[in-house]
Image (spheres, rainbow, N blue to C red):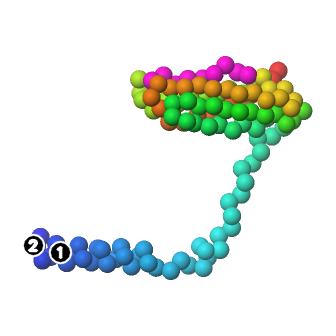
Amino acid sequence: MSFPLRRTAAVLFAAAALAASTAPVPPAAAAAPPAAPPAPLGPGHAECRTRVHGSHATAHCFNGNAGTDRVQLHVECVRWWDPDMDTAQAVVGPAGHVALSQRCWLGIRHAWVTHRPAA
């Protein structure tokens, strides 16, 4: 491909990208309904809020239900040599609160809480 042809192709590509970025939004996309709220976990599950700050993860769980729930925090570390960690299961009774924390050495990729019904 010669230089003038390359320059023409680059100008056409830039013009197409500019035209696509300034195109008006279709009315159907503008009137999209709001996202539905997340479905509740069901009876007996505590509500947990997980926070990751650097290499530390903390989950605060509150059980507003009449049943008992067992919660466990799981942490997936960023580095392959850093082992993924899990906390021990904690029992959260009715109107109970528990805080779980775990860490990685150099960073956390993902942290989540699992629930199991208490026996």
Residue to which mark 1 is pinned = 7
Decide which of 101, 20 is in the foreground and name it: 101
> Is residue 106 covered in magenta?
no
Q: Secondary structure at mark 1?
A: helix
Q: Which residues are magenta?
A: 82-90
Question: Quarter of the image containing the C terminus?
Answer: top right
Relative side of 93 to 15, left or right: right
Q: Residue at 76% of width from left, 38% of height from top?
A: 47
Relative side of 85 to 40, left or right: left
C-alpha gap between disc 2 and disc 1: 9 Å
Q: Amino acid at mark 1?
A: Arg
Residue 75 can be seen, yes or no: yes
Q: Position of residue 61 (x, y in %)?
A: 74, 33
**Badge 1: residue crowd in 10 Å (few <14, some 14–19, many ≥20):** few
Q: Residue at 60% of width from left, 79% of height from top?
A: 27
Q: Residue at 60% of width from left, 28% of height from top?
A: 74
